[in-house]
Image (cartoon, rainbow, N blue to C red):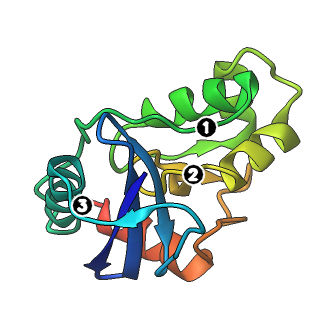
């Protein structure tokens, strides 16, 4: 596994890849116990796409993603990737789209454990009342990302 640090308008993120796919994007500078700090063509492409996103030039990420998680988490993360730029969904809507309308809390946990921040846009999931709730990067970053996506 390789990782690099990328400076963004919401602070540093750490990009992890296995040379075939992005495996994680974490807020802050994360230093894994195993892994090599090394730029790869994939991590460079990820940095480029993230910078384009923050410049509002990229609305869809194109890189291969390989998040590690349970079958249900994978379903939720796939649904999250289908939420278009500038739109939000409630936890209930995501649960319904993932095939289990009663799994709102499980959707919240899957979103919380999303290993690929921003590219798997869990920041686009909000409370039923429209409130900003729960986000691994903190509610201030969630607010910034949602405001960035307003046309």
Residue at x-position 65% and y-position 67%: 136
Disc 3 marks which residue?
50
Q: Mark 2 and mark 3: span between their CA atoms?
A: 15 Å
Q: Position of residue 89 (x, y in %)?
A: 58, 41
> On the picture, is 104 further left or further right than 140?
right
Distance (Cα) linking label 3 and label 1: 21 Å
Element assignment for label 1? loop
Q: Position of residue 132 (x, y in %)?
A: 65, 66
Instruction: Determine whether the residue tagged by mark 3 lies in a helix, strand or loop.
Output: helix
- Vertically, is 115 above or below 94? below
* Image quadrant assignment for residue 40: bottom left
Neighbour class for label 2 at 10 Å: few (<14), some, many (≥20)? many
126 on left or right of 140: right
Q: Identify the mark at residue 68; answer none if there is no mark.
A: 1
Q: Are marks 1 and 2 in contact (CB under 8 Å)?
A: yes
Q: Mark 3 against mark 1, which lies toward the viewer?
A: 1
> Height in image: 54 above or below 9?
above
* Residue located beneath label 2 in the image: 115
Q: Residues within 10 Å of mark 1 (few under 14, many from 20)?
A: some
Please report the residue visible at 16 percent of the width from the left and 58 percent of the height from the top: 44
């Amino acid at each position: 596994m390789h990782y690099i640090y990328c400076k963004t308008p919401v602070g540093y993120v750490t990009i992890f890849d296995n040379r075939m796919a992005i495996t994680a994007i974490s807020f802050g500078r994360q230093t894994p116990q195993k892994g090599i700090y090394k730029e790869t063509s994939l991590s460079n492409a990820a940095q480029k796409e993230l910078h384009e996103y923050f410049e509002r030039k990229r609305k869809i990420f194109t890189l291969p993603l390989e998040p590690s998680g349970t079958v249900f988490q994978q379903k939720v993360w796939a649904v999250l990737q289908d939420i278009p730029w500038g739109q939000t969904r409630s936890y209930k809507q995501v649960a319904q789209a993932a095939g289990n309308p009663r799994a709102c809390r499980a959707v919240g946990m899957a979103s919380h454990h999303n290993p690929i921040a921003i590219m798997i846009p869990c920041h686009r999931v909000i409370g039923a009342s429209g409130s900003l709730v729960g986000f691994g990067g903190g509610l201030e970053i969630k607010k910034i990302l949602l405001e960035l996506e307003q046309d």
